[in-house]
Amino acid sequence: MTKYVINGGKTLNGEVTISGAKNAAVAIVPAALLADGPVRIENVPKIIDVTLQLEIMRELGAQIRLVNATTVEIENTKNPSLKPHELERKLRASYYLLGALLGKYGYAEVAMPGGCNFGGVRPIDQHIKGFEALGATVTLPKGGFIRAEAPEGGLTGAHIYFDVVTVGATMNVMLAAVFAKGQTILENCAKEPHIVDLANFLNAMGANVKGAGTDVIKIRGVEKLHGISYSIIPDQIEAGTFMAAVAACGGSVLVKNVIPKHLECITNKLKEMNVEITEFDDAVLVRREGRLTRTNLKTMPYPGFPTDMQPQMTTALCLAEGTSIITEGVWDSRYRYTEELARMGANVHVDGKIAVIEGVSEFKGAPVRAHDLRAGAAMVIAGLAAKGVTEVEQVQNIERGYETLVEKFVALGADMYRSEIPDSMGAAQQA
Ligand code: EPU
């Protein structure tokens, strides 16, 4: 068992460099399978979700070469064995393999995706609807697999209207449609920066994808894609997490390697909370000295406030003066972590999609769990702001999506370390 031990109560000061975007990388890395020829991807975050994705692709027969810590070269040399893999159950984004393999070979079978479980259901009906509209037959054979098969003659472009705004289905159907005959029109698309990044990546390889970043995406099928070199955008949510940490702990941090435009909704919310933010071309300076002030916040698809920043901002708002109201507008349930915050002295009342926060003046260190990735980031922020020692368990959930989080916070003056406990001792402690 690995845990983070945090001796909180210190302000954060200095500079932090943001890594490549997780939710772009988990789609772009499998999308490399679409190309004939080597694809070099730079600014790849070193996180468990990407490592798993690469391992699955290696097992499928792709050649994977790590050029350096954040650059990988992928060459898809043969039609893969297409056996479903148990590894896929460990990560949500394994479903992008379905779109990429269906697009490339007309057949794909993967284990039903795993990944973050923040309490609610995570359906994939819109992915299936999109594949079927392109002509694929989608079945769910026994054993928790999902299989998609193109008809003889391949997929054909179609007009698809998504019933809900979904990042996963928008990207997955884009992957499947790049070679589909004729034109595919996707409507009610998600507009997140990683959707634009995936479209840019596909277009750089020779695809014809237009409109990414708006709610209508048009794709003209092409014959083949070629190898390229491409750099993934910086992680909006990792940047936001450091910004929320400065809000909670106080101090002054230059958050580098960001696209300030992608951070606008977070920046504006933090300004409402008495956090000073100065924007530069590819960095933001975040400073907080006085007490945080209350605000309300509602999560929405981009360009709304990102759901993946909700736990971190809720945590900061627990320390703000006054009452704040949070509304979760993307997921049915994403507040499980508030029970952990309560152990540290937070006062949050949750009713369905709404959380009402009565600000407290401080947190007290406590043992807490990282129930999922962003909940885990919230626990780290709470621990850094708290008086006394916080031990965060289940940190594998954090390391799925944050690269060297501990090292980055330590460089900002945090007093924290990663503690490895042999499994037998961990189990004894938990019992
Ligand atoms: N939805 C459906 N049907 C579908 C797909 C989604 O009803 O077929 C619903 C969901 O239940 C949800 C909403 O649509 O209410 C949005 O889901 P979306 O498909 O956008 O989520 P996702 O693609 O499964 C990605 C990120 C999540 C992030 C969401 C929303 C990845 C691997 N995951 O999930 O990231 O919360 O978009 O922005 O890209 C995280 O990074 O911590 C994380 C959970």
Image: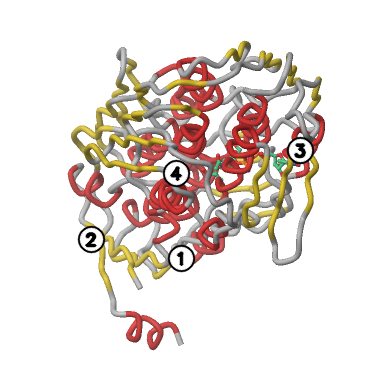
Q: Is residue 260 visible?
A: yes
Q: Which mark is residue 126?
A: 3
Q: Nearer the viewer, mark 3 or mark 2?
A: 3
Mark 1 in CB contact with mark 2 (< 8 angstroms): no
- 35 sits left or right of 411 in the view: right
Secondary structure, mark 2, is strand
Real-space Cα separation, disc 3 to disc 2, in angstroms: 42 Å
Query: Label 1 belongs to which residue?
Result: 369
Residue type, numbered disc 2: Tyr
Real-space Cα separation, disc 1 to disc 2, in angstroms: 16 Å
Image quarter for ligand 1: top right
Q: x, y percentage for residue 339?
A: 56, 63
Which residue shows up at 25% across the image and 28% down it? 254
Real-space Cα separation, disc 3 to disc 1, in angstroms: 32 Å
Q: x, y percentage for residue 327?
A: 67, 40
Q: Nearer the viewer, mark 1 or mark 4?
A: 1
Secondary structure, mark 4, is helix
Circle nearer the N terminus (3, 1): 3
Q: Nearer the viewer, mark 2 or mark 4?
A: 2
Q: Is residue 39 above or below residue 3?
A: above
Query: Front-most of 361 and 35?
Result: 35
Secondary structure, mark 1, is strand
- 63 sits left or right of 26 in the view: left
Q: Nearer the viewer, mark 3 or mark 1?
A: 3
Mark 2 in CB contact with mark 4 (< 8 angstroms): no
Secondary structure, mark 3, is helix
Residue type, numbered disc 1: Arg
Image quarter where the N terminus lies is bottom left
Circle nearer the N terminus (1, 2): 1
Circle nearer the N terminus (2, 4): 4
Query: Label 2 belongs to which residue?
Result: 417
Query: Label 4 belongs to which residue?
Result: 316
